[in-house]
Amino acid sequence: MKNWLYEGKEVTSIEELPQDGFGFIYVTTHIPSNRAYIGKKALYHNIKRKLTKKELAEQTGPGRKPTSKVVSKESDWKTYFGSAKPVQALLKEGKQDEFKREILKVVDNKKLLTYYECKYLFMMGVLEYPETYFNDNILGKFFTRDFGVANED
C-alpha cells in the first residue's frame, strides 16, 4: 500500500505531520481512471473505556463515581482511502496500488476540518464534474444530480 504524501514527502507516522493537527483534508486519486475523491479524516478519535477495578478502587470523594472514561486514540488514517462507494468497491477488488493519496491541508480542530473540506469541494467543483470526481454530495445538502442540466452541455 502506498503511503500518504504531504507537501511532497511520504508520511508514515503521525509525528511527521504538524504537532497541533486534529485532522486533514485529502485527495485520493484512482490513477487508471484519473478520478479523485476529496474528503476529511480525523487523526484521533475518542472512545469510551470502562475503568479497571484498580481505577474504580482509587476513586475518592463524595457523590456518584464514574465507571468509564474517554480516551483519545489514533484513528485508522494510515490505511484510509475514503468513504465513497466506488472507491470502496475498487479497494475490495484489491486495487489499493492503483491509488495515490495526498494530504492537502492539516487543521487543528473539528470545525475547521469540516470548513476546509467544504471549501475544497466547492473550489474543485466536484459536483459539476462527476467524470473527474467520485464525490456525489457536499454536506448531504448539495448533490451531483442537482447539476443534471449543466452536465448535458
Image: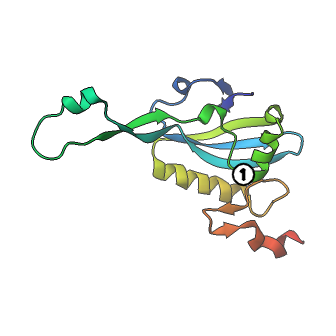
Which class describes the residues within 10 Å of circle 1: few (<14), some (14-19), or many (20+)? some
Q: Position of residue 79 (x, y in %)?
A: 66, 33
Check the image and report above or below for 13 versus 48. above
Scheme of image coloration = rainbow
Q: Nearer the viewer, residue 5 or 145?
A: 145
Outermost residue toward the left in this view: 62
**Side (left or right) of 135 relative to 106:** right
- Residue 69 lies left or right of residue 151; in this view the side is left
Q: Is residue 141 above or below residue 4?
A: below
- Total numbered badges shown on the rendered structure: 1
Q: Amino acid at mark 1?
A: Ala
Q: Residue furthest front?
A: 53
Can you say whether 81 is above or below 58 in the image?
A: below
Q: Position of residue 33 (x, y in %)?
A: 88, 45
Q: Quadrant of the C terminus?
A: bottom right
Quarter of the image with the N terminus is top right
Q: Is residue 14 above or below residue 131?
A: above
Between 106 and 144, which is closer to the camera in this rendering? 144
Tell me the quarter of the picture where residue 129 sits: bottom right
The residue lying furthest to the bottom in this view is 149
User: Which residue sits at x=73%, y=61%?
Assistant: 136
* Res 71 → quadrant: top left
In-front residue for pair 145/75: 75
- In the rendered image, residue 148, in percent from the top left (x then y), is placed at 82, 73
Residue positioned 18% across, 33% down in the render: 59
**Residue behind mark 1:** 84
Under circle 1, the secondary element is loop
